[in-house]
Image (cartoon, rainbow, N blue to C red):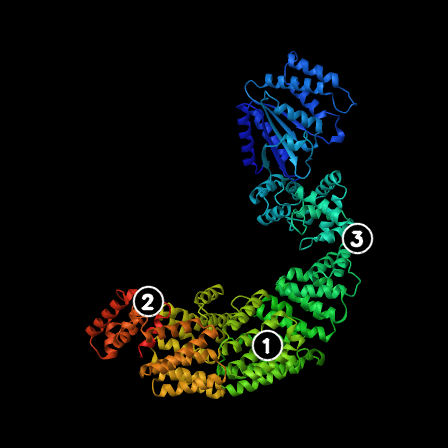
Amino acid sequence: MTGRQAELRRLGAALEDGARGGPVRALVTGEPGIGRTTLLRTFSASARAQGHVTIDVLCTLHDHQPPFGLARQLAMRIGALLPPEHPHRTALDATLAATAGRTSPPDPAPAEVDALLAHVRAALAALTPDGPVVLTLDDAHRADTASLDFLRRLLLTPPPARLVLIASVRDGESRGGGPGELPELFAGARHIPLVGLAPPQSAALIRRVARRAPAADVAAECHRACAGNPYLLTEVARILRDRPANSADATPAAALRPASVAELIGTRLAGLDPNAGKVALAIAIAETHSAADPLLVSHLSGLTLAETLAAVDLLVCMHLVGDDHELFLRHRVVRNALLGRMTLMARNAAHLAAAAYLHGKQAPTERIADHLAASTVPLDEPWAAPVLLRAGQKALAAREPDRARRYLEHAVQAASGEDRRVAVLELIDAKIGIDLVQGLHEAVRTLEETTEDALRLPLLARISTALYLGTDPGTAARTTLTTGRARSGHSGWQQVHRLLDGLHAYPLPSAAHLGEERLGPKGLGLGRRTAAEADFCGPDRVAAATSVVNALRSHLTCRPAEAVRSAREALREETGLCLHPVLRLLALMVLTWNGRDEDVAAQLRLHHDCADCHEHPLHRALLLPVTARLALMRGRLRTAHDQLGECLDALVHYGTRPQHPVLLWIVGMLAEVRLAMGLGAEARALLREHGCLGGLSPDWLHRDVWLTRARLRADSGDLPGVSTDLAEVTGATTPLGPTGGVHAYVHTVDLLTQLGRDAEARDTARALLRTAEAMDTPRERGIALRVLGALGGAPEGEGLLREAMRLLAGAHADFDLAHAAADLACLLFDEGRYEEAMAELSTALELADRCGARPLATRVRQRIAAAEGRSAGRSPLGGVLKLTKREKQILIDAVRGSTNERIATTLHITRRTVELHLSSAYRKLDITGRKDFPHLFRTAGLWPLLVDSAAI
């Protein structure tokens, strides 16, 4: 007995109550196969082992019993327990003999029933001087009415018999009605409902029947398919027992559709309602990945809706169908078994009939496609292929590649012309999403078999992108797929992959002609290939790739004009970039980094109209970093956040390998936006998820990650960590370039300022201005002037900041305009121009709130509060306002890690003076010393307020 200990304990308690006198009744209920009979047998054996008298009766169908048959059988079993010479047994035998063989009338006369009842009660009294008699009545719902009435009178007529009656009833099969029937007999009885086994109990039952321990996933699948039903689990385990233990298919389809289950369910339903079996089979056909519609079930079963619902009600009472407005069989094994009784052609006909019915009712696309895909014969209707194709596209968009593949495989069979081409490409997308290597092999095989350029070129784009993002350079998968496939045109893109892999790191001077060497005719081996073979790599695609490489190299070496010119040349070769979206992404980002928003917007409109660019979800996703960067520069932080998140999800979903530079680049961009929005914890979690909190290679694509990590360290007061991360951004191996746009400079200047490296901060700000002037765009020049103006002080700084605000306002760069207004307010406070400063702070606050830049808005509010004196009584923010200017200077140097001796030397004061100022600052901030510095950084905005107020 597996998993029924609690129920056995409840029956044991009933037995103990019966021993204390009087009859006790208990009713065990449950769905078919739930284990009622086994429970009764186990309990009866336990009672006999304890010395109790037990009588076990299995009720048969009414039609197979003589009238009053159960009562006679019970009287004979009770009499047989007495000695042959016992007077009560003699009396029972005589009474039974008088009614033996009676066929008419159907029931004995009342006087005969009364006499038999008296003799049975007397016999029970003789049998139970020391304990009760245990009577188990299995399948009590099958007993005849007269016998049930006899039992009722036996238990309820005083004096009560010492009898423990345990009966079992199948849910949905018990009869209701008159006073002598089952509900009245067990009114007020103890109810013990049996439910499915728990997963560990299911695994234990499978292990016992199959005679070997199942794998965890096998046991879990069997449990789900059987809903913990012991009978169903036993039948499945028997099939598993007969299979080899090392079989690759641990849970074969046959194990989950045992024929014995279909036979049992079919026979039982036929005996209850002739329509129930038809409805159960119709539900099995109608439910696919979603529940069945009652109207569809009625249509498939050929019954009226009223007849269908009546049969469904019976199935619900039997717990075979869920009680919901939509219909589904609770046990997948039952559904599979019922469908297994049908021939293949009958199933095909039923599913195609269901699809046609649903199409006529304008049902959701996926419901129709489920039935079309369930048939092995395609439906010869013009609407079938488009339905399957739309359903496959929706499944791909919902990140369900297995379901998409099932729809699209049938769409390829049913479609022709343009629909078939689209279906083939979508099917390749689904297969790549399921298994990268196998999907790529399938794509290459399809590429070799087709002769249509309209199909070959998009296939080549998918292969090339998936290989670059999904595999490491030189892996076996790439080698296997590219060796000997020159006629597919893929070998040319293999050279592009090698080039891009080499360009992750900053290009050295020796790589000045890398693009021409790798992508020219000699590098691609075009001289050794036929003209037809060369066309699939093609001169236009070679030129496009070469232009992208040149644009990127010029950008990284701070030559904006050349970078923009090369990027424009690359984007003019539309067919070339359509085949490799990573190259298109780099070309567009070069324009974005250099402030060419109008060019970028025009190119995005062009590519939006290009089918090759937008057929593949991953290709569409690789345009999102460009639109996100544009949104960020315009101050739409939420839009940028959502687009980068969508891009990252698509890269991960379509198999981009972990730590791929492009993936980490997007991670860094998203983390930067999260910091700007005040989502520091989410930014840190993102970096941790993608392994970016540890060491990284010094790639230029990793600069956003390094900067974000350094800013997170600064927010937590880890200034030595800031220095370490900043060294990777500004080191000799990866000189600072505008790879993240001008904001890479801006963040670097902020970090250098916090570290007290003011000279380096000014040099970086001047480099930013030179780069911005070379870009010759108002927004980039405005940002550079803002950074330099914030470092310059009055009056030079004020002029720079006001010019920056003019340029930024004209460029609609609200995010940077808010920063410029806040910086200008600091300078105005320093000159005592409080009213003007408050006006600028109000402007900064309005813009920061509009952009969703919460950290900036918090800082501005703190400055307003400081100016109005509302923070004077609060600690530690209030403590910062109480510090003198000298105390602030010395405290800032101490937080940056300078010793007292070094501070004294730098400020030309004595060490004793430094100690006195620090002691005063500690007292105002309510800390005891340097060890409490981390505590200060738990207050958001304290460090910026401390640094900013030092200049007021």
Q: Quadrant of residue 161?
A: top right
Q: Is residue 864 above or below residue 349?
A: below
- In contact (CB < 8 Å): disc 2 and disc 3: no
Residue depicted at 68% across the width and 36% down the height? 174
Neighbor class of circle 2 (other Cα within 10 Å; few <14, some 14-19, many 20+) is some
Residue type (three-letter) at the residue carrying disc 3: Met
Nearer-the-camera pick, 532 or 773:
773
Provide the residue designation for mark 2.
936
The quarter of the picture where the C terminus appears is bottom left
Q: Quadrant of residue 372?
A: bottom right
User: How far across and how far down the image is residue 836, in percent?
Assistant: 37, 83
In-image side of 821 versus 561 (left or right): left
Provide the residue designation for mark 3.
345
**Does residue 503 show up?**
no
Residue depicted at 27% across the width and 77% down the height? 885
Residue depicted at 65% across the width and 17% down the height? 119
The residue mark sitting in front, 2 or 1, is: 2
User: How far across and how far down the image is residue 784, in percent?
Assistant: 43, 84
First-in-chain label (3 vs 1): 3
First-in-chain label (2 vs 1): 1
Classify mark 3: helix, strand or loop.
helix
Provide the residue designation for mark 1.
496
